[in-house]
Structure formats: C-alpha cells, structure tokens
Amino acid sequence: MLAKAMGIFLLGLVRLLTGAQARWHGCPPKAEQRIYFANHQSHADLVMIWAALPQELRSITRPIAARDYWTRSRLREWITTAVFNAIYVDRARTGEQDPLEPLVRALENGDSIILFPEGTRGHAEEPQPFKAGLYNLALRFPQVVLVPAWIANVQRVMPKGEVVPVPILCSVTFGAPIELQPGEDRHAFLARARDAVIALRDL
Amino acid sequence: MRAAYDFLRTLSPEQQVGALFFLVFGILAVASIAVFLLGFRSRPDADDASRQERLADLRKLLSTSWAMVVVFWVGWAAGNAGATLLFALIAFFALREFITLSPTRRADHRSLVLVFFVVLPVQFWLAATRRFDLFTVFIPVYVFLALPLASALGGDTQRFLERNAKLQWGIMVCVYGMSHVPALLLLDFPQRSYEGKGAFLVFFVVFVVQTCMVVQHLLARQSQRPPSIPGVSRSFNWPSWSLGMAVGSLLGGALSFITPFRPGQAVAMAFIACAAGSLGHLVMKAIKRDRGVPAWGHRASVTGANGLLDRVDALCFGAPVFFHSARWYFGG
C-alpha cells in the first residue's frame, strides 16, 4: 500500500521534472521477456527508464541496482525493493560468487530486466565499452529479446554529487532488438550492442 | 442591442466575466461543429486534398484555442490563488522546455535549482499578493545580479557570459513574461471603478494578440511576397505584419467597452500589445534558428518537449509590455 503510494508519487515527480517520454522506434512495448540495455550516466537512469515503461510492463520488468549505492540508506533500500522490485548486484566482485547469479535467477523466473552494461556511470559523450555480462546472459537465454535503449539528458537533471534535481525534459528511446549470431565473438557482439545503443541517440 | 448592453451593465463583474466565457465557449462550439460537419463533405475533384489539408490546419488551430480558453476559464474559476498557481505551472513547463534546448554545463546546476525552485515561486507569489513594485524589479534587478554570482561560485568560466545570458533570457521570457498574466488579472483601476474585472483585461490582451498573429499568419501564407527576413522566418513579411497589426488594433478599439480605456486609448493599448507579441514571436524564432530547432520542442526531437513555448511566446512578450504601459499611464 505504502509502496504503491510511493510509486505513484515518484512517477508524478519524474513526469513533472522530466516528462519521462518513451519513444518506441524499433519495437512496440510488448509483454514478452526482454533485456533492456541502456547507457548509464546517472543514478536517476534507473528511475527514468522505470517511469518511461508503460504500467503493464513496469510490473514485470526488474531494474538492476548497484548494491553499494542503493542500499546505503534504509529509504533507498526500501524504494528499490518495494517500489522498483530491483535486483541488486555487487559492483566489487567478492570471492567465488558469480555477479550475474541474481540476474540469472530473475530471468529464469520469466521476468524482464533492465541492464546498464557499462557497469558504472560514464561522463563522456559516448558510453564506455560494454562489460561481458550482456553477452553471457544472451548466450544463456537465447529466447529473451535484447532491446537497446538510449536515455537522453538525465545527467543534466542530476549531475554527480548534486542532491536537488532540476527540471529538464528527458526521453528514453527504445530501438530494434538485436540478436546474438551463432558463433559470434564476444567482443564483436558487445561492440555491436554498444553501437545499437549509440545509434538511438540522434533519432 | 442597446437593451442587451444595459442589461449587461446591471450584472456584477463576476456575472459579466461569466457571460464572456459563455460567449467564447459558444463561438468555439459552433466553429467546432462546423469543422466537424465539413469533414464529412468530400468532393472527388482536384483540390479536395488541399481542402482536407486546410481543414486539418483549422482543426489544430481550434484545439489549441479550446485548450487556451479552458485554461483561462479554470484560472478564473479557481480564484486569484488558483490562477496564479496555474500560470506558474505554465511558466514552469515553458522554462523546462527552454532550458532543455539551451545546453547548460554542470556548474550551472545550482543556478538552475535557484531559478526553478526559488525565483519562479517568489515571482508568482509577488504577483498573487499584488506587491507590484517589487514584482516589477525583482527579476531584472535582484535575480539578474544574483544568478551570475551563483554561476561564478560554481567555478567554471567556460562560456560564462553565454551561459548566463541564456539563463537570463529563459527567466525573462518564461517567468517574468508569464507572471504578468496573473498580475493583469489582479490589476485594479480604482479611479475608473474598474475592480474585479481583471479577467477582461487578460481576455483583451490574449484575444487581440492572437487575432493579430492569426491574421498575419494567414496573410503571409496567401501572399506571394518574398519573406522580409529570410534568415529568421520563412513566412514573415512587413505588409502582412502591418495588416495583422491594423486588424488587432482596430479589434482592440472595438472591445474598449470591456476595458477601463476609452476607444482611442484601447486602440493604442492593443497596438502596443500586438507589436510586443508579434515581434516577440519573431525574436523567439531567431533564438530557435540559432539553436537549430524548427520549433520549440518539435514532436520528433529527442527531448520530447511538446511545443508549449511556441504557443505562449507572444503572450510572454505582450503581457509585460501591456501591463506596464497600462499601469504607468493609468496609474493602477
């Protein structure tokens, strides 16, 4: 109940500040199992892409959240678990545990996920090289549709180190799905995925 | 005619404004029904396509007019506080659009926070509480001196002047200009027993400026003349502009009975508002060209802005000039 109210409040806030417009260019919003992968420039990216998805997809799509940032305070932890239904990943690899393990579990459950393959936030014009996680998941779940997305302008809403967001219009552009070709090399695939994301920037 | 006029005189200001909205909604309804019915008629001849296109154009114009009138009606019905809040919200969205399309740097963040969450509310609060003297100088004097300071404290001097100029223009047009609409609603002329009828003044400005813009737009489209300032606008030319100004001003004179002005004064006031509004629109076009966007928040743009600024920019320029002329000359 409280989580639902918080969800509505956050949605209203994001729409007031950014418009939270979704532009579906390569595929329609559809309730099939998907991995959305996007550029990452701000912690607000997670909220942004969550708000841009239609209501029906929001409930079956789980964003990936960095554990160290999103569990730092109890409020953040509550928002990411109760409202966003996020999956935590550890950015610092600890021991034997496979960092992809929680993602694999979510995909096995049939959920869609939102992934930021750069791993950390970038500050350059172009996203950093993608990490191998996307490739490994694509290899393991060939039936899941891979949808690239470009999140525009969010870094202007809340640059690193600031606490008060500024109203700037933002949009999320979803592109045509890509597929892992049989026998495709890991680096080639990751470069192709990155290009697919960058290509959406100027649409 | 005379009897109807005398009857309207006996009504309270409240009822008069209500009657005005009734009239405007009636005209819009008739126009909408006419356009709707025209949509059914199709003749299999050569210019059917161009007629359909004109009809679509007309529909767009009508839906914009509906939206604007509804906004004004809600603003009036919600009382002074409601109206101020409503126009503050419009200013907020317009400024959001302006800032989105003018690139800012990271060091501007604090200034932007200040603009959106301090300057904008304070300016509209000053309007709502009728502190018109401070309202007039708050932005041009205090804010314009304080904002560069906030930027300088940010420590980033790259394109410093340009960034601050952009920010100040955004505030001037979107916040300062728009805040004069609720201020007009609250402007009284005690010595002319013109109190509680500010809605008429707003109606006067909006109607006169919009008429001038529409006439000018339609004439420019019909005329074969080359554009006068092709670098800025593909359609603007001085003859159409003059005609639009003439129509707007004369309409203002004809509407003098709803204003505190005599007919001659009303013509002059309408002329001032039309000149400010239509030329202000031209200025915004020049800024758009500079930024390389065809329209503020074009539908296809990556920012997802929705072109609010395109619709309100004439009002943003016209309202302050009109407000201050009226206040200065008639001593409101």
Image: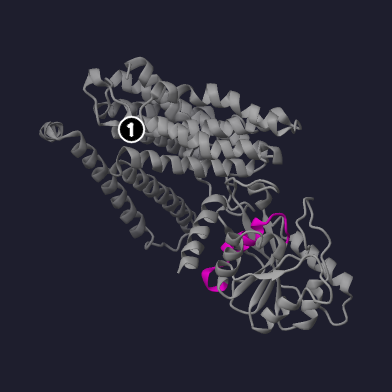
Q: Is residue B235 visible?
A: no
Q: Secondary structure at mark 1?
A: helix
Q: Is residue A60 visible?
A: yes
Q: Chain of mark 1?
A: B
For the residue pair B242 and B19, the one nearer the viewer reads as B19
**B62 versus B269 height, above or below:** below
**Left or right: where A112 falls relative to B84:** right
The residue at which mark 1 appears reads as B185
For the residue pair B156 and A86, the one nearer the viewer reads as A86
Q: Position of residue A103 (x, y in %)?
A: 71, 76
**In percent of the image, x 46 and y 43: which residue is there?**
B90
**A159 versus B182 height, above or below:** below
**B64 versus A104 height, above or below:** above
**Left or right: where B106 falls relative to B299:** right
The secondary structure that dominates the magenta segment is helix
Quadrant of the image containing the N terminus of chain B: top left
**In percent of the image, x 78 and y 62: which residue is there?**
A118
Q: Position of residue B102 (x, y in %)?
A: 65, 40
Quadrant of the image containing the C terminus of chain B: top left
Per the rendered image, the range of residues in magenta is A39-57
For the residue pair A37 and B305, the one nearer the viewer reads as A37
Question: Circle 1: is it few (<14), some (14-19), or many (20+) Cα within 10 Å?
Answer: many
For the residue pair B12 and B243, the one nearer the viewer reads as B12
Q: Position of residue B139 (x, y in %)?
A: 51, 26
Q: Position of residue B9 (x, y in %)?
A: 15, 31
**Left or right: where A189 falls relative to A51:** right
